[in-house]
Image: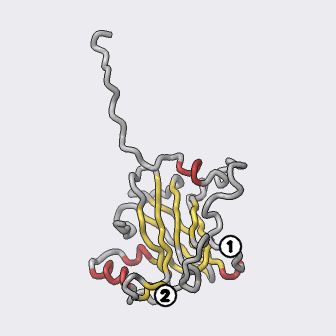
Amino acid sequence: MKNSKKLLDETPSQTAGPFLHIGCMPNKIKINNLHKSDLGEIPFKNKNKTEIITVEGSVFDGNGVALDDVMLETWQCDENGQFIEDNGFARFIPDNFTKKFKLFTLKPGRVQNLEGKNQSPHICLSISSRGLNMTLNTRIYFEGEDLIKDPILSIIKKNKGNLDSLVAKKIQKNVYIFDVFLQGEKETVFFDI
């Protein structure tokens, strides 16, 4: 005991951890009776089902493995380009089995940036996960929209960024696919905000 070590070993830096869902989405993981519903479960209330689109996909790590210990949050305007109180925020997680997420929302309208320039319809997306010590932020744009004049996309294109990584592809009438790649050749463009 004379040579016993009195100091504790260092621990790795804190990340979002595998317990993100417990505090943020208890109903989704079958911990019931804490809240009537999870925050962000329905981004737009009182909308007709025919107006709702689905954005689905997976989040892949640097080895191309789809993750399920990820929480995604979105913020967006409505179909008219208006930000309305208590609408437009969504929080969701991938399915444990399929590793796919599904966002049921409205297709956003155009909004202007601070300089008064029109932006292409988009959804702001943030990603939190075990292994990340900060939230990653990106955007979801939509195939078939005029993306050429968007101020943000113009900057990315000028810097030879992967524009395709920001565009959700239409696979059915109201269904888009949008995969996120955290690292590697297909890495999604993330914003430093």
Q: What residue does disc 2 label?
A: 145
Q: Is residue 90 above or below residue 110?
A: above
Q: Amino acid at mark 2?
A: Glu
Q: Position of residue 159 (x, y in %)?
A: 27, 77
- Cα distance, mark 1 to mark 2? 25 Å
User: Quick one: label 2, few (<14), some, or many (20+) residues within 10 Å?
Assistant: few
Q: Residue at x 47, y 54 (%)?
A: 129
**On the rendered image, what quadrant is the C terminus found in?**
bottom left
Left or right of residue 75: residue 28: right
Q: Which mark is residue 192?
A: none
Q: Are marks 1 and 2 in contact (CB under 8 Å)?
A: no
What is the quadrant of the N terminus in the image?
Answer: top left
Q: In the displayed image of the protein, which residue is found farthest to the top?
A: 2
Q: Is residue 1 above or below residue 77?
A: above
Dot 1 amino acid type: Lys
Q: Residues within 10 Å of mark 1 (few under 14, many from 20)?
A: few
Of the pair 136 and 96, the residue shown nearer to us: 136
